[in-house]
Amino acid sequence: MNILKGIAASSGIAVAKAYLLDEPVLAVEKKTVHDVDAELKRLDSALVQSTKELEEIRAHAMENLGADKAAIFDAHLLVLSDPEMLTPIKDKIKAEQVNAEFSLKETADMFIAMFESMDNEYMRERAADIRDVTKRILAHLLGVRLPNPSMISEEVIIVAEDLTPSDTAQLDPKFVKGFTTNVGGRTSHSAIMARSLEIPAVVGTKKATMEIQNGDLIIVDGLNGEIYINPDDELIREFKGRHEAYEAQKSEWAKLVNEKTVTVDGYQVELAANIGTPKDLESALKNGAEGIGLFRTEFLYMGRDQLPTEEEQFEAYKAVLEGMNGKPVVVRTLDIGGDKELPYLQLPDEMNPFLGFRAIRLCLEEQEMFRTQLRALLRASAYGNLRIMFPMIATLTEFRQAKAILEEEKTKLLQEGIRVSEEIQTGIMVEIPSTAVLADQFAKEVDFFSIGTNDLIQYTMAADRMNERVSYLYQPYNPSILRLIKMVIDAGHNEGKWVGMCGEMAGEELAIPILIGLGLDEFSMSSSSILKVRSLIHKLNKQKMEQLAEEVLQMSVVEDVINAVQETAMQLEKRI
Ligand code: PEP
Ligand code: MG
């Protein structure tokens, strides 16, 4: 048995067979063939197999993931039957007596280069389709297995280098019992998705795809960040026991679902959920969310091949607002960029995507896209308690510009006779140090702050949140971060504004005592963390936590802060 250490990214324990989602190497060599007919037959057979496979995938996607996602495979099937693509491949085999792999690759590369150089966006998307289909045919010619995540129909644990949000969106949580990746940290989006799907995950193992074979039995221990490869029966029994104990603990927490979140001395806060799609609402409600503190709308834009329309977005926002039945719903406008890509936007590659043209920067430039989203939101506002939040705000000017665009769209809608709520609050994510430092000025103009620690920590510490080699610098409890958080909370309160936190820190057991002490009003987290956090807050004394917060703010290294909070936690355990 082999054990891999990684970062515990989503709690729980899973035992199942491994499903490797790594990209195989499809190396093509040029060979001379003597039997051209046999080579043509080999190509035909690969085409037939690829078509059959794609038809199955499309049918499966249609049934489980919806028409949107299935449409991607329609485009692939079109390429597979297109004579303009197939004839030159066959002609080349005949004329040059070369192997099918080589002819396919050369011809496809030529088409890809041609489509990619076109101005027309639709044509550029065809290049991506050709690349995908070529990969599938090549895999059949070379006898190599290509992973098809959307086809999984038995219980598995996904093992991958990394999982992009759109990969994750294609996974059916019915069958995917857990996952592990080579790269990533607790706040990479694959980890966040795992928590929202409530499946255990260990990320940043560095070598899971090297050490684990397809079909190996593995245990994912999402509580301690460990992976066990081909464990013996005794260990499997032990982990099944731990899994049951964890489930029993969850049933205890479940009793708090309708309770308020109040400390022993009567200080009340709000626990909200972070969601990515209207589908996540079910889990938010089941876990007793008192609101939605962060709706990451970029997931509505991912895993498809064009922008969502105003109508599609309106329906999604309306569904969430109605589902929350008057409770607050903070919707964040599009935050694309960093590790979240939209291939169909064709944005140029950047040296430092996390510091680049993303989120509000992109929206203020691509105003048509931004205005469509704002109109959808404004229209949906009539159906609940909407709060609009702008991401990655670095200057007050950006906030003013975004707000002005919002006001313009509101005026237009009202002129068209469309109902828009008069009560919409507008706020910002505080996730860039410049904004945290200048929070007193921002507080005069925004209705609320939500602290985005995932980014605030990476920008303050200059440590990429995706890079496990610098994860030691990713320190939520560094006094510098705690002081910034205090500045933002105090600045908001001085102007009578509420302050929340929607970064992952808001759901972490170690952070809760400090944040209660600092006076945070709203904690927004993965739904699966809400009840655990509520149970913890029920045991805390606000006044004592204020003393703790004061102490840790004066400390100089992160280790001291962690020790101080752990000490407090131990005293709590003793009292119960
Ligand atoms: C954050 O940065 O803390 C945040 C909540 O946003 P995201 O994780 O989507 O960047
Ligand atoms: Mg962020």
Image (cartoon, rainbow, N blue to C red):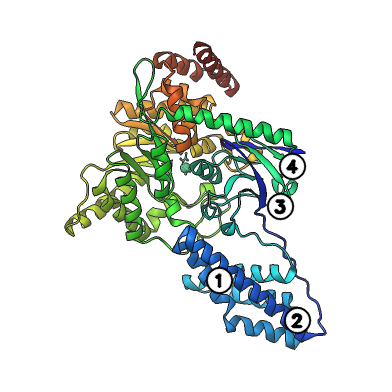
Q: Residue at x 50, y 60 (%)?
A: 347
Q: Nearer the viewer, residue 393 or 26?
A: 26
Spatial CA distance of label 2 from label 4 is 41 Å
The answer to whether residue 119 is seen in the rendering is no
Q: Is residue 203 left or right of residue 229?
A: left
Q: Mark 2 or 1 closer to N-term? A: 2
The answer to whether the residue bearing label 1 lies less than 8 angstroms from the nearest atom of ligand 1 is no
Q: For mark 3, what is the residue?
A: 214
Between disc 4 and disc 1, the foreground one is 4
Q: Tell me the CA gap for discs 3 and 4.
A: 12 Å
- Which quadrant of the rendered structure holds the N terminus? top right
The residue to which callout 4 is attached is 230
> Does label 3 or label 2 sit earlier along the sequence?
2
Which mark lies nearer to you, 1 or 3? Answer: 3
Give the answer, above or below, for where 334 lies relative to 32. above
Residue where numbered disc 1 is placed: 76
Q: Name the amino acid, label 2.
A: Glu
| Alpha carbons under labels 1 and 3: distance apart | 26 Å
- SS type, badge 2: helix
Q: Which image quadrant for residue 7?
A: top right
Q: What's the amino acid at mark 1?
A: His
Q: What amino acid is found at the position of numbered circle 3 in the picture?
A: Asn
Dot 4 lies on which element? loop
The circle drawn on residue 39 is: 2
Label 1, residues with CA under 10 Å away: few <14, some 14-19, many ≥20: many
Instruction: Identify the mark nearer the N-term, 3 or 4.
Output: 3
Task: Give the residue drawn at x 43%, y 13%.
Answer: 544
Q: Earlier in the sequence, mark 4 or mark 1?
A: 1
Beta carbon of the mark 3 residue lies under 8 A of ligand 1: no
**Which amino acid lies under the numbered mark 4 shown in the image of this protein?**
Asn
Q: Identify the residue at the far bottom of this view.
A: 95
